[in-house]
Image: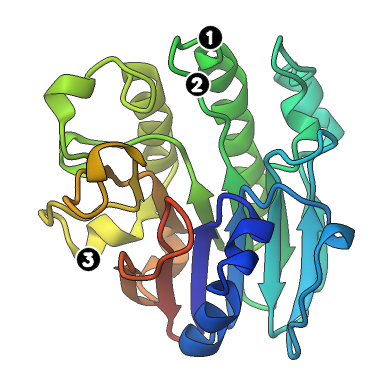
Amino acid sequence: MKLYSWNVNGIRAVLRKGLFISFIESEQPDILCLQETKARRDQFEIELPGYFEYWNSADKPGYSGTAILSKVKPSTIINGFTDKIAEEYNLAGDSYGDPSAEGRVISAEFDNFWVVTVYTPNSKGDLSRLGLRHKQWDPAFLEHVKELGQTKPVLFCGDLNVAHTAIDLANPKGNAGKHGFTADERGGFDAYENAGFIDTFRAKYPDKSDAFTWWSHWANARARNLGWRIDYWLASKTIADKVISSEIHPNILGSDHCPISIEIKE
């Protein structure tokens, strides 16, 4: 099975560019997870024959949102977190809004594993959302995937809005302590690994540099490959050995992020 993840930075925008259907046709993902869809399903037209569609849109128009498209129908779909987790971590919102109402998580249960896609809240340039991110969102999401993992192995993916280590961005010294590369955000990623989740790309390529998934629109950053690796596929230890490839696809255009993929041995 081929599983892809892509922050499309607006599904309507990538459709207008004519690049989404060509991506589907060329890559033929069995499961495709999207982040930052920025639209309800009734706001655009698209035909996806052969795919079951699941969309979790934000209450706020044109903002956030996730989706899972799958050739295999999942047995269960969960949008967001359980009420218990939301209450435990006080995910009622901050000055930017309620992250539980931003369509940031979808979980799909298949025969042998769960697939979870997530669009992690950005801590903002002035770090004004770092507290929510570090103290509430990251531990809530970790508890969510750990709970799912009690029933089946978990494969989770998405835009985690953090470069985990210095090798995961082009300018680590210049960005130390800035949003996306703070100790708190990186510690949240450490917690995933400490809980037994494997960064599938680093497992395959432990020392590979210049492997990025997002580039700023400024200063011709993508052409110069001055980017960040902030999109990931992580796997439970119990299924990580079945991940036979984990790849980044920088040549696929349409967004400021590029798709990433894993292939699972069935």
Do the CB atoms of the residues marked 3 and 2 lie less than 8 Å apart?
A: no
Query: Which residue is under mark 2?
Result: 123
Residue 85 appears at what percent x and percent y?
A: 75, 30
Establish if 23 lies above or below 169: below
Query: What's the residue at 78%, 59% (across, down)?
Result: 55
Read off the residue under disc 3: 204
- Judged from the image, the secondary structure of the residue bearing numbered disc 1 is loop
Q: At which x and y percent is residue 101?
A: 81, 33
Asked if residue 158 is positioned above or below residue 25 in the image, the reply reads above
Decide if residue 9 is on the left or right side of residue 210: right
* Residue 89: percent from left, percent from top: 70, 19
Tag 1 residue: 128
Spot the residue most to the right.
42
Amino acid carrying label 2: it is: Ser
Q: Is residue 236 left or right of residue 190?
A: right
Give amino acid for label 1: Ser
Q: Nearer the viewer, residue 122 or 30?
A: 122
Amino acid found under the numbered disc labelled 3: Lys
- Horizontal side, residue 171 vs residue 230: left or right: left
Check if mark 1's residue and mark 2's residue have beta carbons within 8 Å.
yes
Residue at disc 2, secondary structure: loop
Dot placed on the residue nearer the N-terminal end, 3 or 2: 2
Q: Residue at x 85, y 58 (%)?
A: 43
Disc 1 residue crowd, few under 14, some 14–19, many 20+, Cα 10 Å: some
Residue located 53% across and 9% down the image:
128
Most foreground residue, 14 or 64: 14
Report if the CB atoms under discs 1 and 3 are less than 8 Å apart.
no
Along the line of sight, the residue nearer the viewer: 27 or 151: 27
Q: How many marks?
A: 3
